[in-house]
Amino acid sequence: MTAPLRPTTITELEELVGSELGPSSWHTLTQDDIDRFADVTGDHQWIHVDPDRAAAGPFGQTIGHGLFTLSLGPAMMEELMAFDGFLHSLNYGYDKVRFPHPRPVGSRVRMRATVTRVDRAGDDAAQIVTTQYFEAEGIDKPICVAESIGRFTEHPR
């Protein structure tokens, strides 16, 4: 895998609009991962945590929580583009988030991201929108598609 991009100015971010980044490295979903995510969030729906019942369910096995996949976004994004060159950066939120396909236990997922938009907020700050595509090995549809919003402030000049 190549080193992440390291923009340090809003102008450098603007030059990335339309660029596809990635893919990130693979992440394998284990039942232990699913169970620990369920424990942290309190979401113990059987389709996620009961392998015997899920085997007779619509997917033939347990599936990961969609929000678990989405929660991998920040770490996977750091593999693609690091923002440590800015005074500060923060995750502002998400616009559209969709889970077009379930993520079965044992599947491997990675992320690609497209820099969709950069909106300036004064001379030294901006909001960047990246569209994140989570893809699983052997599955044609994305597992998750999300528009992630970050806010960045440059170092004083």
Image (spheres, rainbow, N blue to C red):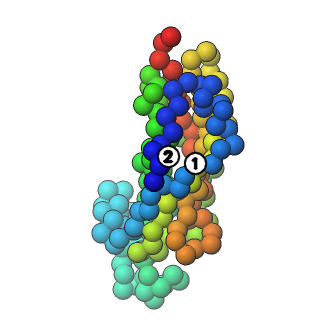
Instruction: Tell me, yes or no, whether the two marked residues, 1 and 2, touch with CB atoms within 8 Å.
Output: yes
Q: Secondary structure at mark 1?
A: strand
Looking at the image, residue 10 sits to the left or right of residue 55; the answer is right
Q: Position of residue 64 (x, y in %)?
A: 44, 68
Measured as percent of width and height from the top left, residue 138 is found at 55, 75
Above-or-below relation of 57 to 11: below
According to the image, label 2 marks what residue?
80
Q: Residue at x 67, y 38 (%)?
A: 17
Residue 130: mark: none
The disc, 1 or 2, on the residue closer to the chain's N-terminal end is 1
Task: Please report the residue visible at 60 percent of the width from the left and 43 percent of the height from the top.
Answer: 130
Residue 110, horizontal then vertical, whole percent: 49, 60
Other-residue count near label 2 (Cα within 10 Å), few / some / many at <14 / 14–19 / ≥20: many
Q: Secondary structure at mark 2?
A: helix
Does the rendering let one see residue 147? no
> In screen coordinates, is 120 left or right of 57?
right
- What residue did someone put label 1 on? 21
Q: Quadrant of residue 42?
A: bottom left
Residue plotted at (33% across, 65% down): 33
Quadrant for the N terminus in the image: bottom left
Q: Is residue 19 visible?
A: yes
Q: Quick one: 130 or 39, which is closer to the camera?
A: 130
Amino acid identity at mark 1: Leu
Which amino acid lies under the numbered mark 2 shown in the image of this protein?
Answer: Leu
Judging depth in this view, the residue of 118 and 60 nearest the camera is 118
How far across and down, in percent of the image, does residue 50 sit?
A: 36, 78
